[in-house]
Amino acid sequence: NLMKSPVRISYSYLFQDGEAKVFELLLDKGTLSLIPRPPEPAPVWTLLERHQCRNCPLESNCHRYCPVALNFAGIAKHFADRISHENARVIVVTEERSYLKDTTIQQGLASLLGVIMTTGGCPVMEPLKPMVQLHLPFATLTETVVRVTSMYLLAQYLRQAEGKSFEFGLSGLTRIYAEIGTVNRDFVRRLREAATEDANMNALVGLDCFTTMAPLMTETMLKEIGPYFSAYLDQ
């Protein structure tokens, strides 16, 4: 049984000073879990007990390191001295297509960090993992709301199909988002230790704003796109 070749997502950053950086993420095709390539030696800020998130279910006797921190450490060092509002051209290549955006380092890094946080072994972030299968870099708030709610409702359908308890509505999603918000805010403390400038931290702050805004905006946004569903609603 040959192992399926991994899913590859590569992020290239072309900075205004002419420097370029390329990072390739490899995901297990069967599980969408990030295939770890931890840096040697692992920095102190990656230890699980160092600024451990308040709602972290992992225990340090089984997990010496925070899995997300360990997976991000190799990338974080390249951005430690970058200013987040500096511009860069970011090119993302997936197996199906490529995306290009001239944006701030902060936004370009947030997109990459989002993949690592959801696939990198953090149990709290795990519910967002199915989103990575249809990874959309630089997603807008509307795109994120539509994708997250679709994913969550599909998950309930899959639970029902397997005869498990399921919940129609989005209150369960709001609970998931609350937990993820805690992780985002607590993880910043690790990045503060890792960085001299602010690109890494602000990438995470940007992600957290999304996490905070998405539940608040969900109802409004779903109302806005409601008319697009007229073929279903007018029957």
Image: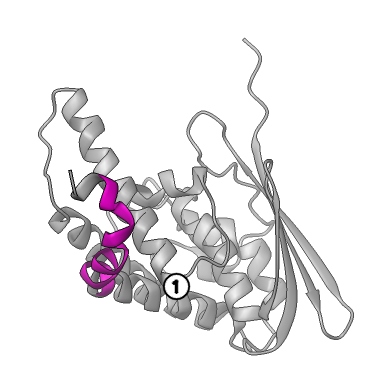
- Percent from the top left, x then y, of residue 220? 24, 72
Q: In percent of the image, x 63 and y 90: which residue is there?
A: 85
* Residue 104 in the figure: left or right of residue 189: right
Can you tell which quarter of the image residue 83 is in? Answer: bottom right
Q: Is residue 222 magenta?
A: yes
Looking at the rendering, in which quadrant would you find the N terminus? top right
The answer to if 210 sits in the magenta stretch is no
Q: Residue at x 45, y 53 (%)?
A: 118
Furthest residue toward front = 235
Q: Secondary structure at mark 1?
A: helix
Q: Which residue is mark 1?
A: 207
Examine the residues drawn in magenta and state their main secondary structure: helix
Image point 61% across, 64% down: which residue?
73
Is 109 situated above or below 8? below
Q: Quadrant of the C terminus?
A: top left
Q: Position of residue 143 (x, y in %)?
A: 43, 62
Of 230 and 95, the residue lying toward us: 230
> Which of these two is toward me, 34 or 95?
95
> Magenta segment, which residues?
217-231
x and y, in percent, of residue 10 in the image: 71, 53
For the rendered model, the colour scheme is one colour
Local packing at callout 1 (Cα closer than 10 Å; few below 14, some 14-19, many 20+) is: many
Q: Which residue is more in the foreground, 157 or 69?
A: 157
Residue type at the position of mark 1: Leu
Question: In x, y percent, where is residue 170?
Answer: 17, 55
Q: Residue furthest right?
A: 18
